[in-house]
Each structure stands twice: as structure tokens, then as C-alpha cells.
Image: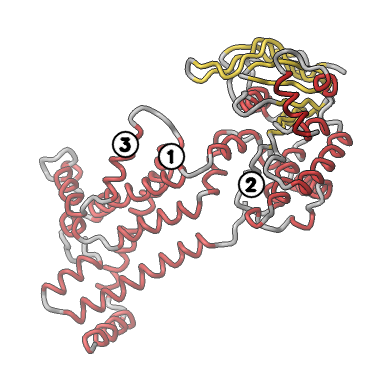
Amino acid sequence: MELLLEGLKKAIEMILSGDPEILEITLLTLRVSITAVLVSTLIGIPAGMFLGLARFPGRKLILAIVNIGMGLPPVVAGLWITLFLWRSGPLGELSWLYTPTAIIMAQILVSLPIVTALTSTAFQQINPKLILQVKALGATKLQLFWILMKEVKLAILAAVIAGFGRVIAEVGAAMMVGGNISGETRILTTSIVMEVSKGNFDIALALSFILMTLAFIITFSLTYLQQRKRSL
Amino acid sequence: MTTLLMVKNLEVKAGKKTLLAVPLFEIQDGEVLGIMGPNGAGKSTFIKALALLETPAHGAIFLKEKDITNDLTLEMRRKFAVAMQQPLLLDTTVFNNVAVGLKLRKLPRQEVKSKVSAWLEKFQISHLAKKQASTLSGGEAQRVNLARAMVVEPDILFLDEPFSALDFPTKAQLLKDIKSIIKQTDTTTVFVSHDLMELRYLSDTLAILMDGELKQTGPTEEVLSSPNASTAAFINEWKSLLS
């Protein structure tokens, strides 16, 4: 209990003192997580919509692969990204390994299947007669997709929240592809692991409080958006 | 009366199976045409094909004598409105539900507002305008569904068994109201049902559809009083049930 209180006290101290390193780590955490979720959302929602509504050969296989991707262990994602970005790898020339870009790539790899699969499930649950009714109301294809998206907006936002949850909690892949380099690729989760390994439990706890606060604020905002008064 | 919509040699298929085969069918301007048939007769398929929601395998479609077979565009589809058995309302307010067809056509906001208000009034649901569609009773939801179809002032209104899930008093009142609205607005209507009572009340003309084929068409009372060899058993069974 004492350790917890000490950690909380330390967290408040670190925030109030405006420790530049903590600020840098927190901002980088926000930058990589939000970028990864944004990219996953921009790709995952249209992909999920397509998988949910279209019928084509091989669709079930793709759905199965996406569903398997939801359980992709972060270290495996980290390993793949490392192999791709390694000097002799296919993207080695880009020199992205041990940069925030590599962390973003790994986070996209673990969150994209979640956003895609949950969005696809939401669209699969739409009554086919509703699609016909919206067409009968005179909707163009784009208008039809927009209306259907509004019909499943709660589920779509839940998919984004789940994707964000995965990204903000991710540590294994970030450690592997980012290397936890101070001032460059150190984010909150990798810092916590490092401080624990050094026995600095108070700092680790302080960082965890900051991480949880960030997660709470962002998830709360998304939930608020999800539960907002419904309008067309 | 002039012919508004005509189909020739219409054939709708699902794979190799023929769901519908209609050599000739006409809808006259201003008429209320009922289509009756047992379950699985192809009534909904017929409505979907007529409302240009399903592309037929074969056949020609004429609207006001113009061949639109190769022009089944959005513009053509927007000349029609369909109200289905389930209201299938969107997850928003009653006002927004009724407004959706107009918004899709990008009508000015003020015009949308005045048209929606007028149709809410006609269907006696103005007091529900701000209510969420999900909170409505079955009868209220079906009124919203019908108002949503009528607000776009369609050339042809297609009704696909919209009263079948309602209790008798609600159904009777709604039938009375829709009949009066159709008459006032002189809207050409195609009304599908398997309920003879509804069809008798609403339709000027009756078409009997069985096994994907039109077996008999004519003025409603004439078809009912003089069924042919193909329709006699079906119609007489209904008449005996009603009597």
C-alpha cells in the first residue's frame, strides 16, 4: 500500500515538476499510439465494411486470417517488423528500425486486425432488407455506405476503442522494434519495464499512473463520442 | 387511364432457378393494383423487379412508354418508393427518418423541413417528430415508414405487405388512412399482400401470382367473383375463410 501511495506521490511530483524526460516519453507515447490507431481506423473501417458487406470467393479465408490477427502476439508482430526493417530486410534501406516509425508499424500490425474484424462483424449483422430499403429510398452507393456506417457507429467506435486499448498497452513489439532508446524511442510501457528491471518501483508506478490516466482520458472521450445523442 | 409502367417478358432468376416469369404486365396511371399470392409465390421478387431494385435476367421495362431497360439508373429508381413489411427505420428520430429520402436527393433544408412536417401531419404523427424511431410501437413505426415513402412524392408507391404484422384495430385504421392519402394524392400504387380483406379494401385491380407466374389479372371484384381454373382453389379457400 505504501509503495502504491509512494508511486502516486511520485507521479504527481513528476507531472507538476514538468520533468522534460517524462514529458517527452508521454508525448511520444501519445504520438505513436494515436498515429497507429488513426491508421488502423482509416484502413480497418473500409476493409471491415468491405469484408462485412461484399461476397466474393476467399472472403471466409480472409475473415479467418483477420480474426487470427486479433490474437497476434505482439512479440511476433515485433519480430516480423524487425525482419522487414533489418538492414538486409526488404525495407532495410529506409533505416526505420529503432525509430518511432517502427513502433507505429508494429502497433498498426496488432491493432488493424482488431478494428477490421470488429467492424466487419458489425456490418455482417445489418439486416439485408435494410440495405435494400436504403437503396429503395434513392441512395447512391456512397450514401448507402454512409447510412449503414451510422447504423453501426456504436460498434465501430467499440472497435476503435478496442484497437486503442491494444496499442496503448503494447510493450513487447515496441521494445523489440524501438529498442527503448532514451530520447528517441522510449515510450511509457517500455520505460515501465525498464524501471521495474532496475528495481525503481516508485518511478515505474508513477509512469503507470500517467499511462493509465492517458488511457482513461482517451477511452472516456471515445466512449462519450459513442454514447452522444444520436442524430442523422 | 394511361399505362405508367409496363414490363414485357420479365424473368428473374436465382442461379438456374426461375423465380418469376411474367410475359406482360401493366400498371395504369393512378390505379391501385393489388398483387396476391401464397407464400413463396414471388410477390416480393416481383415488387423488387418493378421497383428496379433487382436486375431481371430478361425482359423489357417501359416507364411512360419509354424503354428504360438499359437505363435502370438511380434517377429512375428515385421515381419510385417502397414500404416493406418491416418498417426498417434508421437509428435516429422520426423526423430524420421521414426526411432521409429528401436528404439523399439533396433538397434544400427548408424544403425538407416543410415537406416532412406536411407528411408527418398527414399520417398524424407530428407529435412523434422528435422521438427516437426505436421507441415507437409497431403501428407508429409503420406510419413513419409510409410517410418516409410518400414524402418523396413517387410516381409509383410499392407496398410490400406493410400491414401484415399489425394488430387488427391498428391495421384497420392505417388502411383507412393510407386509402384516403392515396386517393387525395392520386398516387399510383402497387400493393402486395396475402390478405384478401386488405386487397379488397384497397385495390382497384387484382393480380394473382402463383409459382412465379401471373395467373389472373382484372378488376378486383371481377377476379374474386370469377376466378379462373388456376386461381379458383386459392381464391375460394380465402373466400370461405372470410365468410
Pinpoint residue B110: horizontal percent, then vertical percent.
Answer: 77, 48
Determine the secondary structure under disc 1.
helix
Pinpoint residue B34: horizontal percent, then vertical percent.
Answer: 76, 27
Q: Residue at x 60, y 14 (%)?
A: B11
Disc 3 target residue: A62
Disc 1 target residue: A52
Disc 2 target residue: B89
Residue B72 occupies which quadrant of the picture? top right
Whole-angstrom CA distance, mark 3 to mark 2, is 32 Å
Q: Residue at x 51, y 49 (%)?
A: A152
Whole-angstrom CA distance, mark 1 to mark 3, is 11 Å
Q: Give amino acid for label 2.
A: Leu
What subunit carries mark 1?
A
Pinpoint residue A23: horizontal percent, then vertical percent.
Answer: 30, 72
Earlier sequence position, callout 1 versus callout 3:
1
Q: Do residues under tags 1 and 3 come within 8 Å of each other at their CB atoms?
A: no
What subunit carries mark 2?
B
Which quadrant, please, contains the N terminus of chain B?
top right
Q: Residue at x 84, y 43 (%)?
A: B177
Total numbered labels placed on residues in the image = 3
Q: Give amino acid for label 1.
A: Gly
What subunit carries mark 3?
A
